[in-house]
Amino acid sequence: MGNNILIKEEESDLLEEKKTVPVTTKKQSNPLLIIFKAAAFFALITSGYSILKPNIYFKVVSANLIPIDFVQDLTTFIISGIMLFIVFTKKIKPLYMQLIFLCFFSYTFYIYGIFTIERYYNYLYFNYLTVFGLSFYGMVLTFAAINKESKIYVTLPNNVKNISIAALLLIPVIFLPMWGAKILELINNNTKPEFYYSVYLFDLSIYMPMYIIVAILLYKRVQLGILLAPFLFILVFPMLFPVAIGEFIKPWYNLTGDISAGAINLGITLIYASLSFYYFKKLEIN
């Protein structure tokens, strides 16, 4: 009996020792961070090459789109450089970093999805496919990471919430009828467009519903909706800004620009950029 007690005591001592022994493990790699760095790097070199060699677009896209594509590449180059600087300096909190990831992936998924689907067959086409694919998987992983953030609590004043809901719904209110009318015209004429069809696909199937869904989540004060709303405001900037500036610089390419359309797009861009700053100022994250 006494021996049994001694054996049990020795076993318990061994268990205690095992618990207290420090275990050294290798640092786990973050797949989301790896995908982000890869997407930002490929977007940086792809847009940079396109800025230096704009003639890669001459045979694969309408001349009317070349000025817009140039501004788009310039915008992508600047954004990608800023994203890489942020991720390597690591001066932003993890939650904010995840939201930045989501905004960047949403942007590159849209832009390089257009380049891929519109068949921009040039030397950079495999880069377009790479960024497009990385952005898709990056969005999936980022949504999963944000959804795990259960220890946060966000608050937003009612007046900011109501303004933001109206702003989120304004984008689909503008673009759904506009693109819908153009598609109905194509259906009635039984014609197939050479360009722009990817814009209809992304806007009508993915991005306009996203704005509506986030508006509903924000109305119900769901935390995910409160967090995503300002980044959908920011997303307006890189999407509409190149279109706006592209119209202004078309005379440099011996083309006629639509100054009124450029001014409207620029106005919308500035309004949503201002709204995003105002939103962050009023948002409280605990």
Image: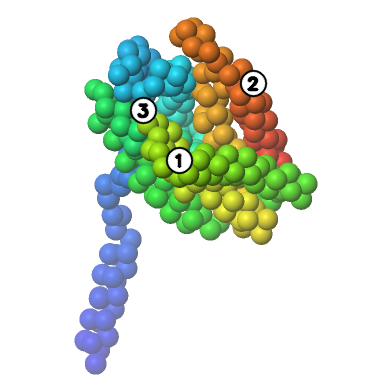
Q: Position of residue 111 (x, y in %)?
A: 42, 33
Inspect the image, locate mark 2, and give the three-letter code of the amino acid beneath it: Ser
Q: Position of residue 258 (x, y in %)?
A: 58, 19
Residue 18 sits above or below residue 167 on the image: below
> Label 2: which residue?
260
Residue 88's tag is none
Residue 9 sits above or below residue 33 on the image: below
Residue 189's tag is 1
Q: Nearer the viewer, residue 144 or 255?
A: 255
Residue 43's tag is 3
Q: Residues within 10 Å of mark 1 (few under 14, many from 20)?
A: few
Using the rendered image of the protein, determine whether residue 202 is visible from the camera's viewpoint: no
Q: Name the residue: 36% across, 23% down.
A: 61
Using the rendered image of the protein, determine whether residue 8 is visible from the camera's viewpoint: yes
Inspect the image, locate mark 3, and give the three-letter code of the amino acid beneath it: Ala
How much space separates mark 3 and mark 1, taking CA atoms?
Answer: 38 Å
The single residue placed furthest to the front in the displayed view is: 189
Horizontal side of 163 relative to 113 (left or right) equals right
Q: Position of residue 59 (x, y in %)?
A: 30, 19
How much space separates mark 1 and mark 2, taking CA atoms?
Answer: 28 Å
Give the secondary structure at mark 2.
helix
Q: Nearer the viewer, residue 33 or 270?
A: 270
Give the secondary structure at mark 3.
helix
The single residue placed furthest to the right in the displayed view is: 159
Q: Nearer the viewer, residue 108 or 205?
A: 205
Tags 1 and 2 touching, CB below 8 Å: no
The single residue placed furthest to the bottom in the displayed view is: 1
Report the quarter where the N terminus lies.
bottom left
Q: Which of disc 1 and disc 3 is earlier in sequence?
A: 3
Q: Residues within 10 Å of mark 2 (few under 14, many from 20)?
A: few
**Looking at the rendering, which quadrant does residue 72 occupy?**
top left
How much space separates mark 2 and mark 3, taking CA atoms?
Answer: 31 Å
